[in-house]
Amino acid sequence: MYDYPDSTGHFGPYGGIYMAETLIPAVEELRVQYLRYQNDPDFKAEFAYELKHYVGRPSPIYHAKNWSDKLGGAQIYLKREDLNHTGAHKINNAIGQALLARRMGKKRVIAETGAGMHGVATATVAARYGMECVVYMGAEDVQRQAPNVYRMKLLGAKVVPVESGSRTLKDACNEAIRDWVTNVESTFYIFGTAAGPHPYPMMVRDFQCVIGNEAKVQMPEMIGRQPDAVIACVGGGSNAIGLFHPYIEEESVQIIGVEAGGHGIKSGSHAAPLTSNSKVGVLHGNKVYLMQDEDGQIIETHSISAGLDYPGVGPEHCWLKDIGRAQYVAIDDEEAMKAFHDLCRFEGIIPALESSHALAHAAKIAPSMGRDKVLLVNLSGRGDKDINTVARLSGISL
Amino acid sequence: MSRIKTVFDRLSSQNRRALIPFFTAGDPSLALTVPLMHAVTEAGADVIELGVPFSDPMADGPVIQRASERALKNHMTLKGVLEMVAEFRKKNAITPVVLMGYGNPIEAMGWEAFAKRCEEVGVDGALTVDFPPEESHDAFLHLQRHGIDPIFLLAPTTDEARIEKVAKLARGYVYYVSLKGVTGSGNLDLSDVERKIPELRRHIKLPIGVGFGIRDAKTAQAIAKLCDGVVVGSRIVQEIEASNEQNVVRNVSALISELRQAIDQS
Ligand SMILES: Cc1ncc(COP(=O)(O)O)c(C=O)c1O
């Protein structure tokens, strides 16, 4: 039976609690509290209620028939996380952690954000539950995801642009950790992806598993069986693991994670630690495949999508790759852009650039598959936030 | 006997406290690190904590972050830091050198290769900020094999059970982080330190150094009354940042002398 992480937070050799001593008691306390509430009937009921009435779950599954016909092969189905309140899967996790924060008596929450979707989700739950909220965001991402910055401010959050390092997601994480170490007693760190020190990879996965658990019920209702493959984009890996995890023991279902190929794996300018065979290393609390130079310095990544622009990946994906249960591939900026435009034009859905990577891989493999095959793609978020980026690439200024 | 133990034993017999400066190797330039190491020793430093720069120094405030950035811009590598210690040892066989940084550069080199090279060049201890005891088994074995002391951090948030755990693993000395925050923070509370040290002493038989947020001679003096060694980092790095290549060695020496005097008067 697949049962990870172990009690010390390891997925095989990956994961762990690689944090400075000041924060170790905080992650330990979080682990204890999470284990306590995880199966608590009140906690579970409140989480389910919020997901239903506040987020609007279950999110539907939609058959992208026009697009599938154009591609002329496998049928593509979309798990519509873009229809959630705040427009992405991130809210599932933000609510889970906020409910835990309240039970732990924390009145201040912090978050890192790349694309801004996790920042918006955190700002949203902070408003909903009356908590102070500070969001750290790389200065470059503040530029390219400007609409989300304003959304966070409208929701009452303070957004702190981070100027250090590559001025993207990893630097936002560094700064959030610095805040946490300083305010550890008052503050709950709502981490946005299935990575970081234990228990985050496990806890975020558990909150996001609502995606896969719903899909496992919905697919048989729609087509009488499970899909042939489930496909999701992988930044840190939360939307992917949320879809994948419930399917791990469904052996007939292929699992495919899609990383950001940027300008192409060969160019070195990408954000695909798994696909590019990066070395294993330690960053942000966990041991994972990590993009780094010879000397163990983290190297700058590139992706058109801010949410995938990260040098590491969650520990469970590292393990799923090693044991061969999931396959990881990369989609470059151009391929993602094409899928973005195709979904807009053929289905009337504007997808997030992150999700467009998963869509592009489905479009790549569908034509060579039979029309009776079914691909379930996690449409992790909507693309409204990306219209400035896309317009700029098309030479249009809004 | 290890250099670290020798130094603390000698100081203890003289009823004095150790002065432990921290600065980042390769800052402000590759050429100035070894001269700075000699200069601080001559000005009264007992142990040198030499920073190994890392691209993502999560536990550091802006001052040491900038030092790391400058060092990396100068192409400082872990291998290069080890060579600097070898160079330093040509003229100094007694002052302990502890490498301080984050785990990933060592992971990339491999713990065995790292520990072996440390032994060869005369490094005495290693402190990796983001490797708590729970994740240090491998590191620990390799360091032990080559006689390198693993230096562990304890924090205001560390409870008694963890203090006991660290007491079993630690060698050399233990580094108490005097505040909740990053290096260079301004919220040091002396009475908190005063309260915590006796709790540490119940389990820790090694010398205890205290650092983070010690920014002037007066604070160094007050801290020295409470423990066995005073670690000063950001303040020294600030001095390096504010100096030029001509006067940096002189300025840092002057600062160390001032700290030395203050500590000896405690
Ligand atoms: C819509 C969307 N999808 C995917 C991601 C990538 O994160 P993860 O890999 O944790 O799902 C993000 C992150 O910002 C996002 O906003």
Image (tube, coloured by chain):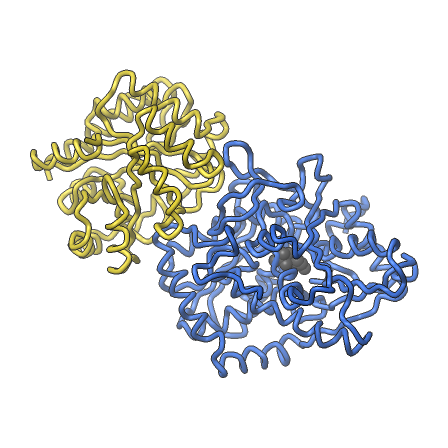
Q: Say whether residue A93 is left or right of residue A329.
A: left
- Please name whichever residue, A235 or B144, is drawn nearer the observer in this view of the structure: B144
Q: Is residue A388 left or right of residue B33?
A: right
**Residue A212, percent from left and from top:** 67, 69
Q: Which chain is yellow?
A: B
Colour for chain A in the figure: blue
Residue B106 in the image: above or below residue A54: above
Does residue B63 appear anywhere in the picture? Answer: no
Q: Residue at 69% across / 76% down in the picture?
A: A58
Point out residue B205 in the picture as x, y percentages from the top left corner: 17, 47
Residue shown at the point (38%, 59%) measured from the top left: A184
Look at the picture and state if A251 lies above or below A315. below
- The answer to which of A289 and A129 lies nearer the viewer is A289
The part of the image, by quadrant, that contains residue B228 is top left
> Where in the figure is residue A187, as x and y percent of width and height?
41, 63
Q: Which residue lies most toward the left here?
A: B14
Q: Quarter of the image containing the N terminus of chain A?
A: bottom right
